[in-house]
Amino acid sequence: MIKTRLKKNDLVKVLSGNSKGTTGKILFIDKAKGRVIVEGVNIVHKHQKATQKNPQGGIIKREAPINITNVELMCPKTNKQTRIGMEVVTDTATGKSKRMRLSKKSGEIIIS
């Protein structure tokens, strides 16, 4: 199981592979296998046999998973790729603290 600071719906940039340089939103994260599915990235053609549910059959285009190490988060402030850090933020009113993700490039807290 891989620890990751990426979350679903994060905007990421692909660093390597056929879709290098493409940006997209994370649709699914498989932490056990270390794979992510990114919207519009690594499109494959699946040959679907005709069934009662889908009587036409045919070729379906869909996203295939890519390795989680091949994507990097896009900073919401600078709109460039950035690494992610963690910071403990304490609420002054309640005194409770929680961990927040922050961009290493701009230092801004990432909310998602």
Image (spheres, rainbow, N blue to C red):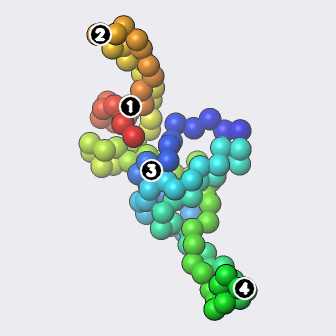
Q: Secondary structure at mark 4?
A: loop
In contact (CB < 8 Å): disc 4 and disc 2: no
Camera-side residue: 8 or 94?
Answer: 94
Residue 47 visible within the image: no
Say which label, 3 or 4, has the lower sequence index: 3
Q: Residue at 36% across / 7% down in the picture?
A: 95
Quarter of the image with the C terminus is top left
Q: Which residue is mark 3?
A: 9
**As shown in the figure, which amino acid type bears the numbered disc 4?**
Thr
Sequence-first disc among 1 and 2: 2
| Residue at mark 2 | 92
Crowdedness near tag 1: few (<14), some (14–19) or many (≥20) residues, C-alpha within 10 Å: some
Q: In the rendered image of this protein, does residue 14 appear above or below residue 91? A: below
Q: Which residue is mark 1?
A: 102
| Residue in the picture at 42% in, 26% down | 100
Instruction: Give the residue type that dot 1 points to.
Output: Leu
> Which residue is rendered at x = 62% and y = 60% of the image?
65
Up/down of 102 relative to 29, above or below: above
* 72 relative to 40, above or below: above
* Front: mark 1 or 2: 2
Q: CA distance from mark 4 to mark 2?
A: 60 Å
